[in-house]
Amino acid sequence: MKVLRTVKDLKEFVLTLKNEGKTIGLVPTMGALHAGHISLVERAVKDNQSTIVSVFVNPTQFNNPNDLATYPRNEQADFDLLESAGVTAAFAPSVEEIYPPEDADKDVHVFDLGKVAEVMEGKFRPGHFQGVAQIVSKLFRMVEPTHAYFGEKDFQQIAVIRRMAKTEGIDIDIVSCPIKREEDGLAMSSRNVRLSANQRAVAPGIYEALRYSTEYSMQHSVQATHDTVVERINAIPECEVEYFSIVDGNTLENISDWEDSDYIVGCITVYCGEVRLIDNITYRK
Ligand code: PAF
């Protein structure tokens, strides 16, 4: 596996792959890789003749400086995992390489992300999706993959990236891959390593409440289902729901009745101590 550090090296490598007639799959990541990421990588390796994985903690998508400072990083372990998964190249640039200080005044494009970016994460993390669109569009333009792979844990992110690709005229097949869970149900996340032993022990209660709510929803209204999830999770020590929204899976608009849509997803963010965890559950598809 090649490790590429500069945009110039990445573009040259991409050109070589294209000249060899190889299709390219791209998996954008922020490193601290776990089995969830590896499931995306394995899918990319299976679908494409070459796979490039970016490993870059993108500062422009962090609205909370402490979250950026404490984001887990473990580059060598990431490279080892990617190499064993059959990745062709890892792209692991510095912040200055992606955002050269001399280009600061040119990098001011505001993406038209529409309503899907205004709700949920968009509301609670101002600027987050502009930062995601900024880095993902750069990566799309540098690599020009045929397919790009994203995990469904970040359900809203996928909708925002699809919208960004459409409004920016970028023709890439965006592949969404199922959430990977620990055996006890906790959605895999790079942030899980920041949970204390006690927090890690109670955090599976988030998915337990979501799963319980799929049964509960069959006999109860949207509002009652919403409230029972919030109550159950807030009753877990150290856990506090930031938001839980039951939405149309395409528009991400809140629904008020189960008959409002034939694709319904519940998206949740919970603080477990200082650690912000997100998850989601499909009620109808
Ligand atoms: O989902 C993530 O890890 C990040 O938001 C992404 C897509 C790699 C962009 O930095």
Image: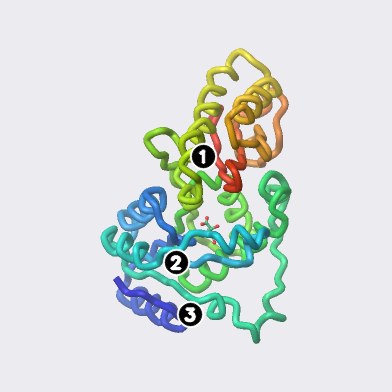
Query: Quadrant location of the N terminus?
Result: bottom left
Name the secondary structure under disc 2: strand
State the residue position of label 1.
199
Label 2 CA crowd tier, 10 Å (few <14, some 14–19, many 20+): some
Rendering quarter of residue 95: bottom right
Image height of 186 relative to 94, above or below: above
Q: Earlier in the sequence, mark 1 or mark 2?
A: 2
Name the secondary structure under disc 3: helix
Q: Which amino acid does label 3 sit on?
A: Val
State the residue position of label 3.
7
Percent across and percent down for residue 114 are 72, 53
Tell which tag, 3 or 1, sits nearer the viewer: 1
CB contact under 8 Å: marks 3 and 2: no
Q: What residue type is labelled 2?
A: Ser
The extreme top residue here reads: 219
Q: What residue type is labelled 1?
A: Gln
State the residue position of label 2.
54
Say whether mark 3 is within 8 Å of ligand 1.
Answer: no
Residue drawn at (63%, 54%), measured in percent from left and top?
163
Residue drawn at (49%, 38%), measured in percent from left and top?
198
Residue 273 in the figure: left or right of residue 199 = right
Cα distance in 3D space between marks 1 and 2: 30 Å
Residue drawn at (36%, 53%), measured in percent from left and top?
38
